Image (cartoon, rainbow, N blue to C red):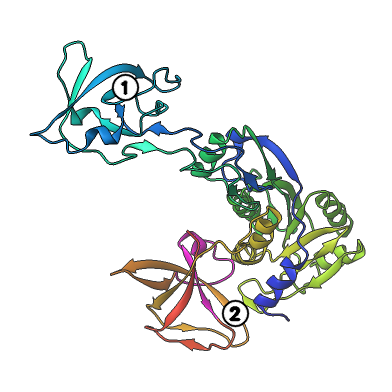
Amino acid sequence: MITANQALDIILEKVSLTPPEEIKLIDSLNRILAEDVYSDFDIPDFDNSAMDGYALRFEDTDKASGDNPKIFDVIDIVRAGVLPKANLTGNQAIKIMTGAMIPKGADSVVKIEDTKMIDPEGKKIQLSSQLSKGQNIRLAGENIKKGDLVATSGSKINSPLCGVLASLGKSRIKVFRKPKIAILVTGDEVIDIESEYSQGKLYNSNTYTLHSQTISLGAIPIDLGIVSDDYEQLKEKIQQGLEYDLLITSGGVSMGDYDLVKPAFKDLGALIKFHKIAIRPGKPVLFGFCKGKPFFGLPGNPVSSMVGFENFIKPLILKMMGFKGVETTKLVEATLEEDIKTKPGLKFFIRAQTTIKDNQFYTRTTGPQGSAILKSMLLANSFIIIDEDADLVKKGTKVIVKLLD
């Protein structure tokens, strides 16, 4: 039986990225760039005004004060998007709007509110303070210069990056294709939630938790439904699932007479990389490759299934999608608010409620930790991680917590 860290190393060792696809920028939020993006021009590509005001020469404002105001002739007006026509000479000003190109001869902009109009026709203004050279001017290239590397392959596109790409005129970009994740639930006891309930049966919850966990990563879940503990039907469903980028099965991976998932994969020529991981909950995790596609066999217990997805499948999907940093969940140190008894040799992922008090993290369990108690996941916002060498972890001990939200 291998450790959790060993299992993750094996899982991520030979991950194939999904192929790139070109999409519209407007549809790119939260997608992962599949190309480095360079700027083809300066942004802005001309000096422009940061204010509504007057463009002039800073040297003409020398020693301007309330006792020594400077008078300027307003010779023109320039608005954003229109090229200036006039050139400035001494003691002249051009009225300018925010974003408009700086006229030739001007090197500074004074805000309208810092001037006084002394001519009813707006042809003369008075300035009572000295400017500095370049004041209120946004220089060409001060945002992005031509040739700058703006974003690298593997970057997640958020709202600011989307805006920057738009400012570069990138109407279409290359991103990694969303992987399609096939989800298959097994077991004679499992019934669809639209079926009439009967004693001895269980409504299928695992499809819905795995489906939502997949969507939360930005991947595409493919529901293969429920298959009974019939060997040939199971093999047929597995072959159907291998048409997608990744296949996840739930149930049928323990040691019972009807745990048929591992034999079915082997019968289809699968390379089994490992079967059990020294963790709780979710020890009997199956992983391997079949017909060139990775697959996971998760335990059927609802919590084991979710824990297996969070800790082992999530990193694989993120890497398939092109993420550079596979581990995106934050680990923090928290003070334990109750004693926890564990079993040496297993790494425990204990469902927990973690809070902040006086800028410190505190954590406690969500109650009973049985692998079928799905409510414990509903109450959890984190996992307390207890390493393999622990036995009893006492209240007040500092522990590592993996935040889920």
Whether residue 99 is situated above or below residue 220 in the rendered picture: above
Q: Position of residue 221 (x, y in %)?
A: 68, 47
Q: Position of residue 86 (x, y in %)?
A: 39, 18
Outermost residue to the left: 67
Circle on res. 94: 1
Q: Position of residue 157 (x, y in %)?
A: 57, 46
Quarter of the image holding residue 52? top left
Crowd around label 1: few <14 · some 14–19 · many ≥20 (10 Å): many
Quarter of the image holding residue 97? top left
Q: Nearer the viewer, residue 286 or 315?
A: 315
The answer to if 382 sits in the magenta stretch is: yes
Work out whether mark 2 precedes mark 1 in sequence or the reverse, and give the earlier one: 1
Circle on res. 347: 2
Q: Which residues are magenta?
A: 366-386
- Considering the numbered disc 2 on the image, is that residue within a helix, a strand or a loop? strand
The answer to if 298 sits in the magenta stretch is: no
Give the residue displayed 49% in from the left and 59% down from the top.
Answer: 378
